[in-house]
Image (spheres, helix red, strand yellow):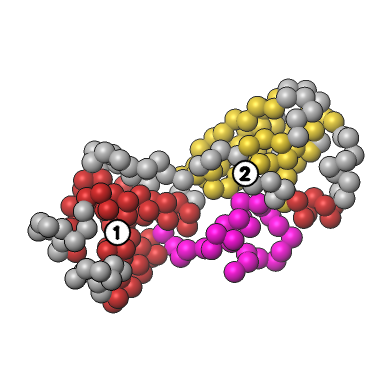
Amino acid sequence: MTLQDLIGLYRAQAQDDRQPYFCSDELLTIYANEAQMQACRRGQLLRRRVLLNYAPGQESVAMPEDAIACLRARDADTEVQLWDVHRMDASMPNWQRDGARGAVQFLVSGLETDRLYLWPRPGASGQVDMVVSRMAKPMRAMSDVPEVRPEGHAALVQWMLYRAFCRGDTELFNERKAALALAEFEREFGRASSLRNETWLRDGQGMMPGPIA
C-alpha cells in the first residue's frame, strides 16, 4: 500500500470521505508516520547493518540517529559484548582509567546519550560491525510505501483511526471506536513501552531483573 492507499482506507473506514474532511491529507500523513514509528518502537521490525569506524585510542562511537537498539556487534571476526555501564562498573570498576589497549571486546552504553564506549580502547584503526533495529523513514509523497512489511500495512490504518477518533474537537470523536482501533493496532504490533523502558533496552542487558515501568 502507498501513503495514498493508507489515507483512502482510513477515509473509507472512518467515513471521513466527504469534503471538507475532518482530517486533512496533511494530518493523516502525520498519523501514518506516527503509526510506522510506533510499530518500529514496539516490534523492532526494521533492522540494518551499520559499520562504525574507529581510530587508535578512540574512546567511543556514535549510534546512528535512527537506531532504536544495537542487537549484536562484531569487531573483525570477534563478537563484541554489549554491556551497560552499571554492569561494566560492577565487573571492572576501573575500566575507564585502566589505560587498556587492544582489540575491542565491549561496547558500553549508558554513559552518554547515543554513544557507545569502547573497551579496551583500540590499539589500531578498525571497524565495529553492528546490527541495529531502526526507525522507519518518514513518508512524504503520496506514492511512498511504508517500510514495514506489506502484511502490516492495514494495521497502520488502525493507528490513524485511533488518532482521529481521539480528536475531541470534531464529530469523529468516539472513545469506544478509538479503543477498538488501538486494540487492533496492538494486536498486530504489540503494546507500547515507556521511553524509559526503551532506554533500558537500548542501554542493553542492564543488571536490573527486568524493564522499568
Reading the image, the residue beneath label 2 is 114
Name the residue rendered at 66%, 41% in the picture.
Answer: 115
Q: Does 201 appear in magenta? A: yes
**Residue at the bottom extreme of this rendering:** 176
Is 41 left, or right, of 198 in this rendering?
Answer: left
Magenta-colored segment: predominant secondary structure? loop
Residue 138 in view, yes or no = yes
Q: Residues within 10 Å of mark 1 (few under 14, many from 20)?
A: many
Q: Residue furthest front?
A: 169
Circles 1 and 2, Cβ within 8 Å, touching? The answer is no
Looking at the rendered structure, the kind of residue marked 2 is Asp
Magenta stretch in the rendered image: 189-213
Residue 67 or residue 91, whichever sits in front: 67
Residue 89 is situated, as x and y percent measured from the top left of the image, at: 82, 52
Mark before the other along the chain sequence, 1 or 2: 2
Query: Is any part of residue 105 visible from this angle?
Result: no
- Residue 107, given in percent of the width and then of the height, sits at 72, 41
Q: Secondary structure at mark 1?
A: helix
| Residue 4 percent location from the top left of the image | 21, 46
The residue depicted at 83 percent of the width and 30 percent of the height is 102
- Direction from residue 35 to residue 63 in the image, left or right: right
**Residue tagged by mark 1?**
160
Location of residue 44 in the rendering, given as x and y in whole percent from the top left corner: 49, 51
Q: How far, Cα to Cα, is label 1 from label 2?
A: 30 Å
